[in-house]
Amino acid sequence: MHEHLLHLFFPHVCLLCRKQLLPGEEHCCSSCQAEFDPFSTPLAAEELLRHTIFSHFGETFLFERGWCRYQFHRKSPLQQVLHAMKYEGLFNLGRSFGRQLGEWMLTEGGAGDIECIVPVPLHPLKKIERSYNQSEKIAEGIAQSLQKPLRRDMLVRKRYTVSQTGLSALEREKNIEGAFQVAKGVVAGHLLLVDDVVTTGATMSAAASALRHGGAERISLAAVALAIKE
């Protein structure tokens, strides 16, 4: 954590190895990023995302399209970086990951009819505690790449929940059930729901359910990473 805090004051060195960043590198050097484990294609990512969600929810959670950039492994360099983004104040990492994800989505042309981008919200108390919502920062980066409007106000978290980390699949589903509600002004259409990491899909499922009740016709999903069973 100490090294991550140093990154706030010395942003031009790699977050992981502390080496000077080269022109074009952002937050992490190319060598450290090479250890992340990206998906080979958007289609490969979507197939595994659908398999993960189907294995937990069957056909009760259907979505239009799905994008994840990386495979998430415990105790990996990517986990260190995402932890710094989420808990240690390095919110600009979220925007960077979002821009990368948005640009990757554009490579296969499947995001053209998305009307707006909706981040998974934090409960107000948790947002005060962290000072920002990492999913919102990721969504900002995606919105910049896709040139689509960002709707921070569309979805609210009405119930405080404990962290999903360490919970079983069933505990995750129960923990997050009914936690979201739609604010006024939802426009029916195709929405992109954004989170940082998908593990079982419980959070995405609960958020998507609230959006559908609010009038959304189609919902696609985007996350920086998809957790891999190991």
Image: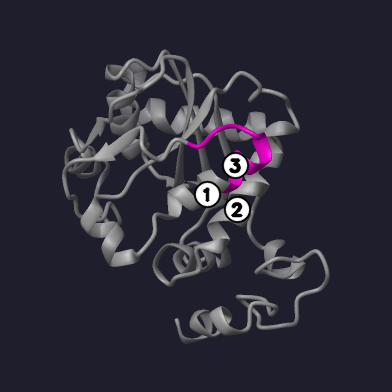
The span from disc 3 to disc 1 (Cα, nearest Å) is 6 Å
In the picture as drawn, the residue positioned furthest to the front comes out as 185
Give whichever of 133, 16 is nearer the camera: 133
Q: Tell me where residue 53 sits by quadrant.
A: top left
Look at mark 1 in the image and give the residue it sits on.
138
Mark 2 or mark 3, which has the lower sequence index?
2
Instruction: Tell me where residue 124 appears, x and y as whole percent.
Output: 24, 53
- Give the magenta-colored segment's residue range: 141-150
- Can you identify the residue that label 3 sits on? 142
Q: Residue drawn at (50%, 63%), measured in percent from left and top?
A: 91
Report if the CB atoms under discs 3 and 1 are less than 8 Å apart.
Answer: yes
- In the rendered structure, the answer to whether residue 142 lies left or right of residue 61 reads right
Query: Amino acid type of disc 2?
Result: Phe
Q: Please name the predominant secondary structure of the magenta segment in the image.
A: helix
Q: Residue 21 vs residue 79: left or right?
A: right
The label nearer to you, 2 versus 3, is: 3
Query: x, y (%) of residue 152?
Result: 41, 40
**Looking at the picture, which amino acid does disc 1 mark?**
Ile
* Helix, strand or loop for disc 1: helix
Label 2 residue SS: helix
Q: Position of residue 205 (x, y in %)?
A: 33, 30
Residue drawn where x is 69% and y is 63% of the image: 33
Please give the residue where the numbered disc 2 appears in the rendered image.
97
Determine if residue 55 is in view: yes
Q: Earlier in the sequence, mark 1 or mark 2?
A: 2
Q: CA distance from mark 2 to mark 3?
A: 8 Å
Check contact, mark 1 vs mark 2: CB within 8 A. Answer: yes
Query: Which three-letter amino acid code belongs to the residue tagged 3?
Result: Ile
* Residue under the point 80% across and 64% down: 24
x%, y% of residue 3? 53, 84
The crowding category of the residue bearing disc 1, from other C-alpha atoms within 10 Å (few below 14, some 14 to 19, many at least 20), is many
Mark 3 residue element: helix
